[in-house]
């Protein structure tokens, strides 16, 4: 009887973990979809480029704080040393899903509390220019999505971890590989994000500030990530790093 109850308890635990992972994933998909509208001012109540409603200094301070919250959460929780401590508090199978959930919540908080600044810096008014800019914006999202699938979308968003747990299997780390886009730049995912934040036909102070802060964050995040990758993969990643440029194809090793 006790063994039967243990089996049922373990099965319930696996169902709970798997459901949690799916919920976290769906929240992230909804959040990123909202982010598209937020960046191009379509289909959302509060978008990036609304006119200012208060002082410029206050808006910049609040927005900088919101971006810092996301950047710190996104980078600190991704470090191996933090994961070692964190998984003493939460089960290993939901570590990645929880990271994804908290990243989504940090973005939702940013969307909610963003302080509009307005003030256009430049505007592209001709149809051809707008088509080019929006095409590059869309290309950025395509690159982001494609990059996640090339390195295993489901592992990146925590679904593989909870599915393996549901099956009663141990998690295995993915081998180092450089598929398709990763043969041209080491961080195509970040290339996609840079296109997403910079490509807009109307560049306002708010948009420029977000794009600039995001670019600075990406350049810092790359250094942290590559240090972790060198620690994990050693000379294999060092060789890859020497051969493939960081963000701009055919520009040399860095």
Image (cartoon, rainbow, N blue to C red):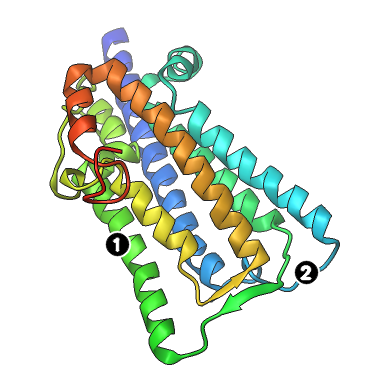
Q: Is residue 54 left or right of residue 213?
A: right
Residue topped by disc 2? 52
221 is higher (above) or lower (below) than 192: above
Q: Is residue 42 left or right of residue 135?
A: right
Residue 142 - label: 1
Q: Nearer the viewer, residue 88 or 76?
A: 76
Secondary element at tag 1: helix
How crowded is the residue under tag 2: few (<14 C-alpha within 10 Å), some, or many (20+)?
some
- Give the position of the N terminus as an image quadrant: top left
Report the residue at 60% width, 63% height from top: 207
Report the residue at 21% width, 31% height from top: 242
Report the residue at 23% width, 29% height from top: 164
Secondary element at tag 2: loop
Task: Farthest residue to the front: give it.
Answer: 252
Residue 196 at x, y percent in the picture: 43, 61
In 3D space, how far apart are the residues under numbered discs 1 and 2 (Cα atoms)? 31 Å
Residue 116 at x, y percent in the picture: 72, 65
Q: Nearer the viewer, residue 253 or 3?
A: 253
Residue 155 - label: none
Residue 176 at x, y percent in the picture: 17, 29
Q: Nearer the viewer, residue 253 or 5?
A: 253
């Amino acid at each position: 009887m006790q063994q039967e109850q243990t089996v049922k308890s373990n099965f319930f635990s696996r169902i709970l973990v798997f459901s949690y992972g799916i919920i976290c994933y769906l929240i992230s998909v909804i959040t990123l979809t909202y982010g598209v509208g937020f960046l191009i001012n379509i289909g959302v109540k509060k978008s990036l480029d609304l006119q200012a409603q208060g002082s410029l200094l206050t808006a910049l301070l609040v927005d900088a704080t919101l971006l810092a919250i996301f950047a710190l959460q996104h980078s600190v929780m991704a470090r191996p040393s933090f994961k070692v401590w964190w998984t003493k508090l939460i089960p290993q199978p939901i570590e990645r899903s929880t990271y994804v959930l908290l990243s989504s919540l940090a973005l939702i908080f940013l969307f909610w509390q963003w302080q509009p600044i307005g003030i256009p810096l430049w505007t592209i008014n001709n149809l051809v220019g707008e088509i080019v800019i929006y095409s590059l914006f869309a290309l950025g999202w395509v690159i982001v999505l494609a990059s996640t699938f090339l390195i295993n979308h489901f592992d990146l968003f925590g679904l593989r971890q909870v599915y393996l747990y549901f099956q009663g299997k141990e998690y295995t780390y993915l081998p180092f590989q450089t598929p398709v886009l990763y043969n041209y730049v080491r961080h195509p995912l970040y290339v996609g994000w840079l296109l997403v934040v910079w490509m807009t036909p109307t560049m306002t102070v708010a948009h420029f500030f977000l794009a600039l802060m995001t670019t600075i964050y990406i350049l810092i995040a790359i250094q942290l990530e590559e240090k972790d990758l060198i620690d994990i993969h050693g000379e294999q990643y060092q060789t890859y790093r020497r051969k493939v440029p960081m963000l701009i194809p055919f520009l040399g090793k860095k």
